[in-house]
Image: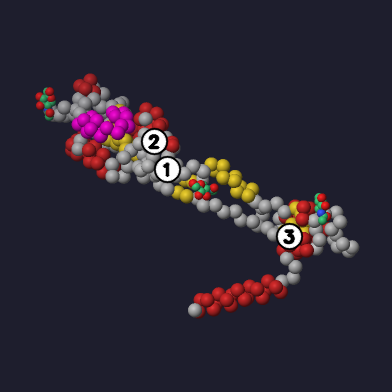
């Protein structure tokens, strides 16, 4: 009840003040030419009728609200009053992947609608349209696992050997389009990062540990949706060794970042490279 009353009071206030206002924005603009008048407000029109101006009226009298111009005797077909418009150029419906064909390519998935609109705007006149966004469930995800195979990672390698299946299982809850890849790195293969004696180049580890030759970076498994290949390949990875404790991880990240084509990430929309772990 209170709300209703205050609303009425508010409307009353608006009416009172509007009716007291002299002229309107079109007249107040004191426009000298059509363009100036049109920009004065969304309601303003310019009368081009040569017989319109009465004795003593200045050219700015041609600018007024539409209704007033007609009332003052301007020929309706001679009133300049452009209006804005909205043209939908591309408006493909957002993709509902539960209804879409199974083999739909990522670039055919639509998440925002409309895709392209052409607007003609007039100063002071708003244009509005609804923008629809639907996050495509099942949007493709690539995961590239980059692993340090220096000697201290020996115990971690054992854990990662079971990771592929678990990751695949968890990710399948988020998307049915999941790819996994695997790469490894050790160190720059020069002194002083590794020992370059012939024996240590073959097996950099001490004691009876069987380590593989040190290497900078290897792309072991390009992105694939076959999780078992991840497990199998991680399973046969051998640990290596080098001299100093910082490792060549950034060299590997650099390789992954710039060689997207080799990993198969080029087939992804907006995909320059895979995600890192
Ligand atoms: C309005 O203008 C049009 C085009 O100039 C003309 O054909 C028509 O006769 C005019 N109407 C009046 C009422 O003056
Ligand atoms: C786009 O198409 C939908 C129907 O699929 C319609 O509801 C919507 O108004 C259109 N959007 C625009 C900006 O034309
Ligand atoms: C390393 O390899 C040799 C020969 O293949 C084998 O006898 C030895 O047990 C291996 N050592 C380890 C720690 O696996
Ligand atoms: Ca190192």
Residue 243 location, quadrant: top left
Bounds of the magenta segment = 219-235
Q: Is mark 2 on a helix, strand or loop?
A: loop
Query: Disc 3 on helix, strand or loop?
Result: helix
Res 45 → quadrant: bottom right
Q: Which of 186 and 59 is in front in this view?
A: 59
* Residue 184 numbered tag: none
Position of residue 89 in the picture relative to residue 213 (left or right): right
Are there few (<14), some (14-19), or many (20+) residues within 10 Å of tag 3?
Answer: many
Q: Mark 3 points at which residue?
A: 66
User: Residue placed at 67% from the left, 52% from the top?
Assistant: 83
Location of residue 233 in the rendering, given as x and y in whole percent from the top left corner? 23, 29
Expressed as whole percent of the image width and height from the top left, the position of residue 178 reads 32, 38
Locate residue 132, reporting x and y percent. 47, 50
Q: Are marks 1 and 3 in contact (CB under 8 Å)?
A: no
Q: Residue 95 carries which label?
A: 1
Q: Does the magenta stretch include residue 257?
A: no
Residue 43 appears in the figure: yes
What's the CA distance linking mark 1 and mark 3? 45 Å
Instruction: Please check the rendered image and state whether residue 226 is part of the magenta-colored stretch, yes or no.
Output: yes
Q: Are marks 1 and 2 in contact (CB under 8 Å)?
A: yes
- Which of the two discs, 1 and 3, labels the residue nearer the N terminus? 3
**Image mark count:** 3
Look at 60% across and 48% down and name the residue there: 86
Relative to residue 169, is residue 1 depicted above or below? below
Q: Residue at x 85, y 54 (%)?
A: 50
**Which comes before the other along the chain, label 3 or label 2?**
3
Residue at mark 2: 104
Spatial CA span between label 1 and label 2: 10 Å
Q: Earlier in the sequence, mark 1 or mark 2?
A: 1
In the displayed structure, 277 sits above or below 236; it is below
The C terminus appears in which quarter of the rendering? top left
């Amino acid at each position: 009840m209170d709300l209703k009353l205050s609303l009425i009071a508010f409307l009353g206030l608006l009416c009172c003040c509007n009716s007291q206002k002299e002229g309107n924005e079109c007249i107040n603009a004191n426009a000298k030419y059509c363009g100036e008048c049109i920009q004065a407000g969304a309601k303003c029109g310019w009368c081009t009728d040569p017989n319109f101006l009465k004795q003593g009226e200045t050219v700015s009298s041609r600018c007024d609200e539409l209704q007033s111009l007609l009332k003052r005797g301007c020929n309706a077909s001679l009133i300049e009053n452009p209006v804005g418009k909205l043209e939908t150029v591309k408006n493909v419906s957002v993709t509902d992947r539960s209804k879409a064909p199974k083999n739909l390519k990522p670039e055919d998935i639509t998440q925002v609608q409309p895709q392209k609109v052409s607007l003609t705007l007039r100063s002071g006149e708003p244009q509005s349209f609804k923008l629809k966004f639907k996050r495509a469930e099942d949007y493709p995800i690539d995961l590239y696992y980059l692993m340090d195979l220096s000697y201290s990672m020996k115990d971690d390698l054992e854990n990662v050997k079971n990771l592929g299946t678990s990751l695949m299982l968890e990710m399948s809850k988020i998307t049915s389009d999941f790819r996994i890849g695997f790469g490894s790195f050790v160190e720059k293969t020069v002194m002083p990062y590794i020992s370059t004696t012939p024996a240590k180049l073959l097996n950099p580890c001490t004691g009876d540990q069987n380590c593989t030759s040190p290497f900078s970076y290897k792309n072991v498994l390009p992105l694939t949706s076959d999780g078992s290949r991840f497990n199998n390949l991680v399973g046969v990875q051998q640990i290596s060794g080098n001299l100093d404790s910082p490792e060549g991880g950034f060299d590997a990240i650099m390789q992954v970042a710039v060689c997207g084509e080799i990993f198969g990430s080029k087939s992804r929309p907006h995909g320059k490279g895979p995600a890192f772990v």
